Image (cartoon, helix red, strand yellow):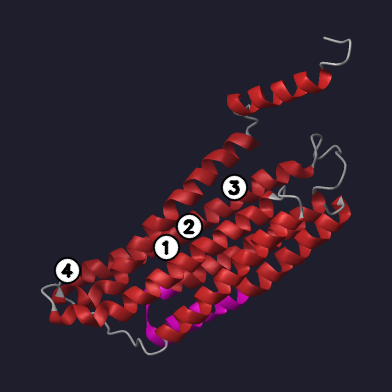
């Protein structure tokens, strides 16, 4: 078991690694969008960009939580974690809204009979393979460091979950884009030109649940909502067992 100071250093190194990895993925996603014209890859790059910002903020919060309470934070700096989740959820919802708006505009143009620009899919296979592997490496690193810190860092656990989600989305998006030309020889050939817009909507729906749930919980914590009754009951049982040998009520 690592000491608290060593656990904090492990957490900081893991978060810094996450900032670098997400920055690479964000740059790769935006570059892939410019080369291919795919809005789905743009959304993937924007999601990684959000993760860069959230990793930077998480790293700063990791440094602050060890500070003692003061007038600004009378109950301790741990409360910044709830504000971090609240901020990240709002930004992610904004990115999802942008993706839905862009895809809806494309679908409206297609419905009106306007020509939809063809995608250049040559770089998609390489992008999908490299970014999925990098997401997997990032998820493994955060998960391993979470265990090394005693399984108490909610920041590392959140970042590991984000990396897994990003890996699944990148892989699914890439495979769907690569398979889209096959629609032209099927009864669904009319949908081949709007596969990218449909993917954006599907990815947006897949991403929507997590920030909404995180936003609800973060708002409850920020507003001073009481802990879950089950958590209070388990805590009470542990305390009663520990205090059972003392002559006190």
Report helix, strand or loop for mark 3. helix
Q: Which mark is residue 111?
A: 4
Which circle, 3 or 2, is nearer the viewer? Answer: 3
Q: Is residue 117 above or below residue 147?
A: below
Q: Earlier in the sequence, mark 4 or mark 2?
A: 2
> Percent from the top left, x then y, of residue 242?
81, 23
Question: Is 23 left or right of 148, judged from the image as shown?
Answer: left
Report helix, strand or loop for mark 4. helix
Q: Residue at x 71, y 55 (%)?
A: 147
> Percent from the top left, x then y, of residue 19?
67, 69
Measured in 3D between alpha carbons, the distance from the residue under mark 1 to the one under mark 3, in whole angstroms, is 19 Å
| Magenta span | 23-41
Q: Earlier in the sequence, mark 1 or mark 3?
A: 3
Residue 115 makes an appearance in the image: no
**Mark 4 packing: few (<14 Cα in 10 Å), some, or many (20+)?**
few
Q: On the image, which quarter does residue 13 sit in? A: bottom right
């Amino acid at each position: 078991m690592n000491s608290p100071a060593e656990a904090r250093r492990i957490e900081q190194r893991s978060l810094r690694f996450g900032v670098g990895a997400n920055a690479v993925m964000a740059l790769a996603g935006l570059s892939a969008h410019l080369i291919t014209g795919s809005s789905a890859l743009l959304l993937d790059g924007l999601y990684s960009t959000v993760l860069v910002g959230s990793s930077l903020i998480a790293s700063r919060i990791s440094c602050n939580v060890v500070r003692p309470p003061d007038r600004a934070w009378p109950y301790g700096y741990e409360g910044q974690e709830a504000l971090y989740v609240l901020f990240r959820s709002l930004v992610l919802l904004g990115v999802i809204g942008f993706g839905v708006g862009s895809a809806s505009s494309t679908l409206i143009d297609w419905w009106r009979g306007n020509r939809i620009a063809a995608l250049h899919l040559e770089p998609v296979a390489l992008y999908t393979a490299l970014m999925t592997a990098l997401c997997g490496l990032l998820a493994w690193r955060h998960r391993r460091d979470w265990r090394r810190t005693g399984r108490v860092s909610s920041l590392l656990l959140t970042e590991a979950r984000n990396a897994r989600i990003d890996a699944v989305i990148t892989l699914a998006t890439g495979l769907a884009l690569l398979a889209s030309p096959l629609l032209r020889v099927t009864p669904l050939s009319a949908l081949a030109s709007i596969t990218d817009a449909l993917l954006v909507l599907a990815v947006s729906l897949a991403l929507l649940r997590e920030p909404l749930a995180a936003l609800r919980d973060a708002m409850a914590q920020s507003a001073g909502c009481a802990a879950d009754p089950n958590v209070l009951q388990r805590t009470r049982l542990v305390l009663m067992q520990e205090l059972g040998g003392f002559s006190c009520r």
